[in-house]
Amino acid sequence: MLSQHLKENIILLHIRESELEESSTKLCSVEEKWINNQMSFETYQRWYNDLTQKRMSLRAQISNLSQSQDETWVLLSKQFYKLNDMRSLYNAASTLQKQQIIRMGFDNRLYYQQQVYRTPYIMPIFNHNALILKEKNLLIIEEKKGFSKKIPSSGAAGIRTLVQTHPP
């Protein structure tokens, strides 16, 4: 699963790099049109601001995706037998490695709000603990707006077999 995730990150990195190049080309075009008096100052400002923000966002994403995963792989390969005890794996890691483990588990979307950790994503391998974590008020998995196509694994609304009743 981790190697698949890393492969997907490499593909996403290439996509973001091409989007950055495209955005830079568009920005040059906007600047050229402004210099040649082919657009108004307001239009130029709007496009310049939009494209600059997009480029900054893409650079941040590229930086995130470019980070070396070698240290994480070394840690996981040395401690693979301890994966059933995540606490000892986490305690054995350096601060940067701990951050990478958390980023992998929550796809870099873990945040703290109202005295509880929250995330819209958790690695599927940890889903079996989601109900316990919610009951203990340790972690709330917030699904984004819209209908979830995935059947929840447990909980009051997560029963797998629906009770079918026949009309009277």
Image (cartoon, rainbow, N blue to C red):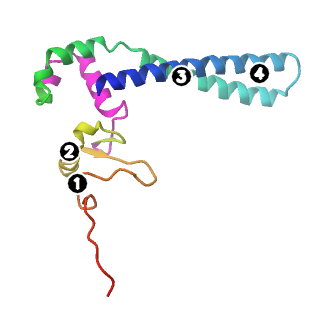
Q: Secondary structure at mark 2?
A: helix
Q: Earlier in the sequence, mark 1 or mark 4?
A: 4
The image shows residue 112 at horizontal and vertical percentages of 32, 38
Identify residue for label 1.
154
Separation of residues labelled 3 and 2 (CA atoms): 33 Å
Query: Which mark lies nearer to you, 4 or 2?
Result: 2
Q: Is residue 139 above or below residue 15?
A: below
Q: Amino acid at mark 2?
A: His
- Residue 129 location, quadrant: top left
Identify residue for label 2.
128
Do callouts 1 and 2 mark residues in contact (Cβ within 8 Å)?
yes
Disc number placed over residue 48 in the picture, else none:
none
Q: Secondary structure at mark 4?
A: helix
Q: Quadrant of the C terminus?
A: bottom left
Residues drawn in magenta: 89-116
Identify residue for label 3.
15
Q: Secondary structure at mark 1?
A: loop
Separation of residues labelled 1 and 4 (CA atoms): 53 Å
Separation of residues labelled 1 and 3 (CA atoms): 36 Å
Identify residue for label 4.
30
The image shows residue 60 at horizontal and vertical percentages of 49, 21
Q: Amino acid at mark 1?
A: Ser
Q: Secondary structure at mark 3?
A: helix
- Residue 28 location, quadrant: top right
Label 1 Cα crowd, 10 Å radius (few <14 / some 14-19 / many 20+): some
Q: Amino acid at mark 3?
A: Ile
Q: Quadrant of the N terminus?
A: top left
Q: Earlier in the sequence, mark 4 or mark 2?
A: 4
Q: Earlier in the sequence, mark 3 or mark 4?
A: 3
Q: Amino acid at mark 4?
A: Val
- Whether residue 97 sits left or right of residue 40 in the image: it is left
